[in-house]
Amino acid sequence: MSSRVEILPGRGSVIRHGELTIWAGPGVSSELISFLRQSARNVANSATSGRQVADHIAAILTSRDPERSAPFAVIGPAEAGWAILLHGPVQAWDGNQWLAPTPDPGWLRTVIDPSPAVSVGPAGSPAPRLVLASPYNLVAGMVPGGGVIVLPGAGEPEPAPTGQDRAEQAPRPTPEPAASVAVPRPSEQLRDDRPGTDQPWGEQPGGAAPQTEAPQEHAAGAIGPIVDLRHRSGRGLAPLPSGAAPAPKDRPEVGGIRCPRHHFNRPGSTTCAVCRTEIPPGQPQVPGPRPTLGVLLADDGTVLRVSRDLLLGSQPKVDGVDEPALQPVTLTGAPGLAPAHAELRVHGWVLRAIDRGSAEGTHVWVAGSSDWVKLAPYSPIDIPPGSHISMAQRVLTYLSPWR
Amino acid sequence: LEVRLRSSLADYQLLGSYGPGGEHDGAWLARPPGRLGGSDATVVVTEMVDPGPEAWPAFVERLSDLASIHHDHLPRLVEAGRTEEPEGVVVWVTRDGAATRPLIPAPGQRDPAIAAVAAAARAAHALHEAGWAHGAINPAAVLTGADLTLLAPPLAAVAPDPVRVGPLSSALAYDSMDPMALWGEGPSRASDIWSLAATAHALITGRPLHPPLGGDTVVAAAQRILIEPPELASDLDAPLAGILAACFAPDPADRPQTAAELADQLESLVPGR
């Protein structure tokens, strides 16, 4: 089932090709309209058209913004959810939240889960009333409109292309941009700011460098600027300290004891986890940056570092990351895994697991016990080293040098 | 089972896989496009995980830092871009990268292997002095040609993953990792020195530091390396065994202080150096 695209009254243009919908507000140049329209046509048959166009435009905006105040929005499917890119004074309501770009950088690219629709229009406009039985539906093409409502899965299959854009809805078609306006493909929008493209192709031991042809601005098959690295200068980083890497500055302080060689260890340790020398009893506790607590060894060989709080799931970047300190970790290969399945939180020297109310639940085999235990939702449980954590069909083993 | 037959990446013509792992390594021999002068020279093309448009500027800044490090035993980075199919970052690496290939462990090749690792240690030292830890030194990262030895560039360090340690696709892939790095502490001079020594051991003896490793599952291998100390091959000559053993000291303070120091020690074992 395709999406239904309803046009809202007002000034601007709505473009739809395939599952990709674009709204461009008043004041947008004809060049930008042409670019957006052609971009939509290029990806019309893609199952990830939204992500492709949003990423492509984001890549351009990262290096330069040709029309900083132009209001436009791109909405279309991504691998998971719907990609949306908002630029300039626009806003979107996805049924749960308002989205709008901040003044700097002036654009926003994210993924949403429309429930059941997403509406887009100029900044400051009220949320439109959704008429679920509305007969209006833009199937393909470009029409005038002051905003748009996109209802994923609520439309009808797009008819076979006839060579002409067509709209089922009433508004008069907007005149197409003049035929003389160049319509660049997305990749042709990319310019390269690299210096030295007239430089020869590297040096070759034992032979002269080959002649360089006329420089091109981008590579076929590339979706962003090509960066010439041959003539770049670095920032001049300081040499590494000798020995091991120092603890990152964002590590929290915890209490610990020091071995005779001054390595920081968990209280109660009898052998240093670093140098393996014995730690005499009665060492005073001192504060120090918490080392990495250990690792989670996944059943596919993935090693996950446990140095901060983690959120594990199939799409933890999309759902559930409501704390900046919670690091999303995507696990694959388990159909029953919830988008945000479980949290693993570091508390002092202890790891704690918390199920986030997942349908299949989180099970733990605590080291030394005889059976698996299903976690009650949102009830933390301590995970000693050697324990196993099972989520859907994935199993993680927690190992730590700090016993 | 996914089988990918690819003839091009961006506008580079792929000529074949580069590393010992075939296409799974994500590196190919390739013919450069005409816009770079064409020519018959071949280059190495490496595919990486796409950092996404928002992280791209920081990624380029890190790549530029890395590209500005010039050393006789480091390949030169040429260019980078994001590709549309398959999606991912491609870093095009050369300085005759195509004239070199990853070394294959081969017992009986002691002196060439020692010389190659010494050269790699020189390159690692240059990285360290420029503020970079390599973090992925292993036999496949030592590239040799007729008159050239290179250390593969530390591309994984350009976009370090805050959580995942690796990539570790096989049990043997763990063998060159300092256990402290596998425990999750960041790569460092000391962990690179461990890895250089483990690489020398593998190239010279053809055996892993943790002997049963080849038959282990990836999970069992990781557990073994985390818990058990390395075991040097018994047929190593005493001077070489002494140098390598020092690099495997649990306390980083007991290892050679710099990779250049290790290079000096290794070169002293090779006649004519």
Image (cartoon, rainbow, N blue to C red):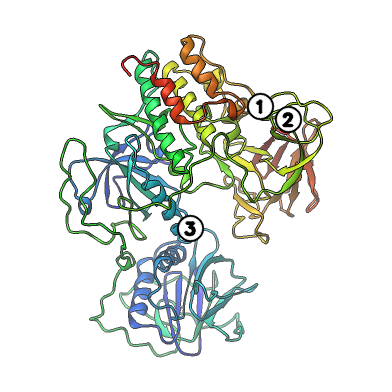
First of labels 1, 2 by sequence position: 2
The spot of residue A133 in percent (x, y) is 59, 81
- What element does badge 1 sit on? loop
* Observer able to see residue A351: no
The spot of residue B133 in percent (x, y) is 49, 39
Residue denoted by label 1: A275
Q: Which mark is residue B246?
A: none
- What element does badge 3 sit on? loop
Q: Which mark is residue A259?
A: 2
On whether disc 1 and disc 3 are found on a single subunit, the reply is no
Quarter that holds the N terminus of chain B: top left
> Spatial distance from mark 3 to mark 2, Cα to Cα?
41 Å
Question: Disc 1 vs disc 2: which is toward the camera?
Answer: 2
> Spatial distance from mark 1 to mark 3, Cα to Cα?
38 Å
Q: Is residue B100 above or below residue A333?
A: above
Closest to the observer: A395 or B162? B162
Contact (CB < 8 A) between labels 1 and 2? yes
